[in-house]
Image (spheres, rainbow, N blue to C red):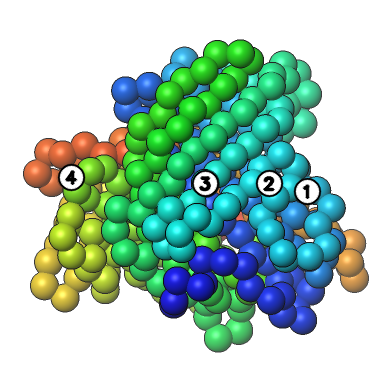
Amino acid sequence: MTPDDDYLHTPGADPAFSESMYFHFYDPRARLGGFLRIGNRPNEGHGEVTVCLYLPDGRLGFAYEQPRVTSNDRLDAAGMRVEVREPMRHLELAFDGNVTVVDDPTMMTDPRAALGGSPVRDCSLALSVYAIAPESEHSFDADDVSFVPNHYEQPIAVDGRIRLAGDATTIHGHGLRDHTWGPRSWQAPWFYRWVHGCTDGFGFMGAWFGRQDGSAIRGGFVWDGRVQHRVTAIDLGTVRDDRDEQVEVDVVLRSAAREWKLHGRARATVPLRHRPTDDTTGRVSMTRIVESLMTWTLHDGRELYGMSEYLDQIVDGRPVGLEV
């Protein structure tokens, strides 16, 4: 990777070419956080824009659109915009549009009912994103499938303001961003577990991509405030509720010489899904993506905030990766 990779890339010929950026943040003082994602799929003629705000009172502010996008010149669609001010160091993130405010985030199991029966509110945000550690490059592609062939992540500090239905909140928090480009299919992984957290002086990411044959690709990083360590092994233990959604997660991250243990508790969980239709057979498949805002406790007692994202293909009504 070079700093120029923080800008956009020339689309490849693959119809599934995608380029996206993701930003997570949380401010423990304001008790407000969430994630935003914007992506271009120019060969398919559309983009993907997601706003997911975990509100202080337990409600969810949510928006998802697939605006028409036919080029990869900029990340600017459906009210969201990303501007690279200094590559790998400073980006500006803005959104101006509407979100649906859902009283109970677990209602998103049935998004049509949850969003159709909830009020729509105007929302705007302007966030300055600053790197607090080097970027960490990873690819979790297998030889025969492509999910994120070009991919890096970075711990960040986030400052700015969010306005929802006229009420403004100042944000001073931490989080993580990622940037990916290349062919992407949400159905490529059999399942994956993606966990991350960040605070002043410490940040981590761990990933476990499971294959249908039982093998897995694992990786990640730990930033200890001075050095970025590449994770060479990861253990995960998950406690789930009666909806098979994560409520607690234990993580052990290992590098060549060190080990870090974290215990995570889900503060709020949003079940999302992707339902593509096969153009040849007409068959509809189901991919479930469970997004949990997490409080992580490090083995030395420090607390930090982040996410756990659990993706599973759904077979016979159940997630396929329940053993991890």
Please state which of the two labelled residues, at mark 2 or mark 4, is closer to the viewer. Answer: 2
Q: Residue at x 39, y 58 (%)?
A: 89
Q: Secondary structure at mark 1?
A: loop
Please state which of the two labelled residues, at mark 3 or mark 2, is closer to the viewer. Answer: 3
What is the three-letter code of the residue carrying label 1?
Gln
Q: CA distance from mark 3 to mark 2?
A: 16 Å
What is the three-letter code of the residue carrying label 4?
Leu
What numbered label is drawn on residue 66? Answer: 1
* Image quadrant containing the N terminus: bottom left
What is the three-letter code of the residue carrying label 3?
Glu
Please state which of the two labelled residues, at mark 4 or mark 1, is closer to the viewer. Answer: 1
What numbered label is drawn on residue 93? Answer: none
Residue 109, image x, y percentages: 64, 34
Tell whether label 1 touches label 2 (CB within 8 Å): yes
Instruction: Work out whether residue 232 or residue 306 is closer to the camera in this orientation and state it.
Output: 306
Q: Earlier in the sequence, mark 3 or mark 1?
A: 1
